[in-house]
Structures are given as structure tokens and as C-alpha cells.
């Protein structure tokens, strides 16, 4: 939010520093870690199926979960 201050009897608006939203902040950190790992989309899908015991619905839920978004630093959208 912009605050006002007076300078020689003139009101001047000044902009304070805004905090980055938590999701973008954690995604930025995760993106650096993910770049070191070099995961492919196929590996992520295979890991989701392994976690979900081969069930399609549960694998989709794992891939599109907020936890996966934070871990990868990217959002996965499944169109089908």
C-alpha cells in the first residue's frame, strides 16, 4: 500500500516494498532445485503412477496437487 509523507508542506506518495506471494516464493526456490535434478515430464508421470499404485484417478490427483506444483516449481495441467 502506498503511504503518504509530507515534504515542504506537499503531500507525496511513496510506494513500500511488497512481499512476494508464498507460492511464487517457494516455487522460485523449488525451480532452482528442480533445474539441478533435470526431471522430464515422463519421469514425473511415472513417479505419480508408482505412488498411486497404477490407478489413473489417483495419479492425476497427485500430478495436479499443490504439493507437486510447489515441488516442481511448475503447474501441471492435464487436458483430456
Image (cartoon, rainbow, N blue to C red):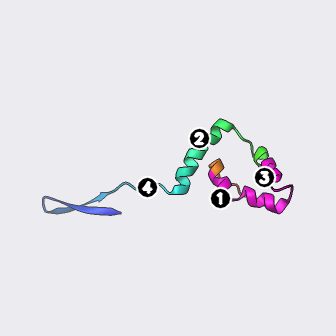
Which element type, helix, strand or loop, lies under badge 2? helix
Residue 39 forms part of the magenta stretch: no
Mark 2 / mark 1, whichever is N-terminal: 2
Between the residue at mark 2 and the residue at mark 1, the CA separation in whole angstroms equals 18 Å
- In the picture of the structure, the residue carrying the numbered disc 1 is 66
Between the residue at mark 3 and the residue at mark 2, the CA separation in whole angstroms equals 21 Å
- In the picture of the structure, the residue carrying the numbered disc 3 is 48
Circle 4: is it few (<14), some (14-19), or many (20+) Cα within 10 Å? few
Residue 56 forms part of the magenta stretch: yes
Q: Position of residue 10 (x, y in %)?
A: 17, 62
Would you say the residues marked 1 and 4 are in contact, meaning their CB atoms lie under 8 Å apart?
no
Mark 1 / mark 3, whichever is N-terminal: 3
Magenta span of residues: 45-70
The answer to whether 46 is drawn above or below residue 55 in the figure is: above
- In the picture of the structure, the residue carrying the numbered disc 2 is 32
- In the picture of the structure, the residue carrying the numbered disc 4 is 19
Q: Residue at x 62, y 49 (%)?
A: 73
Is residue 5 found left or right of 48 in the rendered image? Answer: left
Mark 4 / mark 3, whichever is N-terminal: 4
Circle 3: is it few (<14), some (14-19), or many (20+) Cα within 10 Å? many
Give the quadrant of residue 11. bottom left
Between the residue at mark 4 and the residue at mark 2, the CA separation in whole angstroms equals 20 Å
Amino acid at each position: 500500500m502506498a503511504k503518504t509523507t509530507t515534504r515542504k508542506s506537499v503531500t507525496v506518495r511513496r510506494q513500500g516494498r511488497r512481499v512476494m506471494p508464498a507460492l511464487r516464493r517457494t516455487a522460485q526456490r523449488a525451480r532452482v532445485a528442480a533445474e539441478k535434478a533435470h526431471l522430464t515430464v515422463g519421469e514425473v508421470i511415472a513417479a505419480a503412477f508408482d505412488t498411486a499404485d497404477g490407478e489413473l484417478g489417483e495419479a492425476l490427483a497427485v500430478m495436479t496437487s499443490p504439493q507437486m506444483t510447489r515441488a516442481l516449481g511448475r503447474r501441471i495441467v492435464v487436458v483430456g
